[in-house]
Amino acid sequence: MFVLLLTLQTNPKGWAGPDLIIALSFVWVLRRPEFVPLPLLALIFLLSDLIFQRPPGLWAALALLAAESLRQRASGLRDQTFWSEWLTVTSFLILLTLGYRLCLAMVFVEQAPLGLSLIHLMMTIIVYPVVAYVSAIFFGVRKPAPGDFDTLGGRA
């Protein structure tokens, strides 16, 4: 968030970078759901709404719904390949972006151009494997094996 708020250039950009907060939260929710409590996600998403001057709570609510849906699918995706995980996250990101734009359109709020939103979506989809790799290598956030225990002592 800090780097995005820096005024490094005065001309508007013709492209949009990825949403690393969403990518990181989806990786952690799918791989270690017990590491990411719902109130923490809500606070982070709401804070990002306020900092990036989006309508407060809309993106946060949609992102929380997506994260919780992914949390429910985490055990089913544990035995699947990374490609199926990536495809699932991609579908959720597409639905999240479409839902956000649809909600803004319903109340006639001015939005970013469609092309810029699509670039933002594509960059987030492309960066997801990188975020998953960095989370696994540097933070040790991997999918639990079938016999592993979670942080609460139960079977993962």
Image: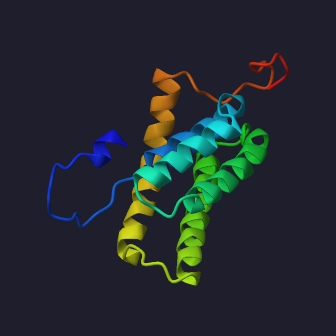
Looking at the image, what colour scheme do you see?
rainbow
x 56%, y 69%: residue:
100
> Which residue corresponds to the image point at 52% horizontal and 74% vertical from the top-left?
101
Residue 119: image location, x then y, percent: 37, 65
Q: Picture coordinates of residue 144 (x, y %)? A: 71, 26
Instruction: Tell whether 40 sits left or right of 125.
Output: right
Q: Quadrant of the C terminus?
A: top right
- Counting from the top left corner in percent of width and height, residue 140 is at 55, 21
Q: Position of residue 70 (x, y in %)?
A: 70, 48
Residue in the image at 60% along x and 70% along y: 99
The reply, left or right, for residue 74 in relation to residue 101 is right
| Image quarter of the N terminus | top left
Q: Nearer the viewer, residue 108 or 128?
A: 108
Residue that lies at the very extreme toward the right in this rendered image: 154
Q: Residue reaching furthest top?
A: 153
The vertical placement of 56 against 30, above or below, is below
Q: Nearer the viewer, residue 67 or 56?
A: 56
Image position of 116 with respect to 146: above or below: below
Count numbered badges in the picture: 0
Please name whichever residue, 110 or 96, is drawn nearer the observer in this view of the structure.
110
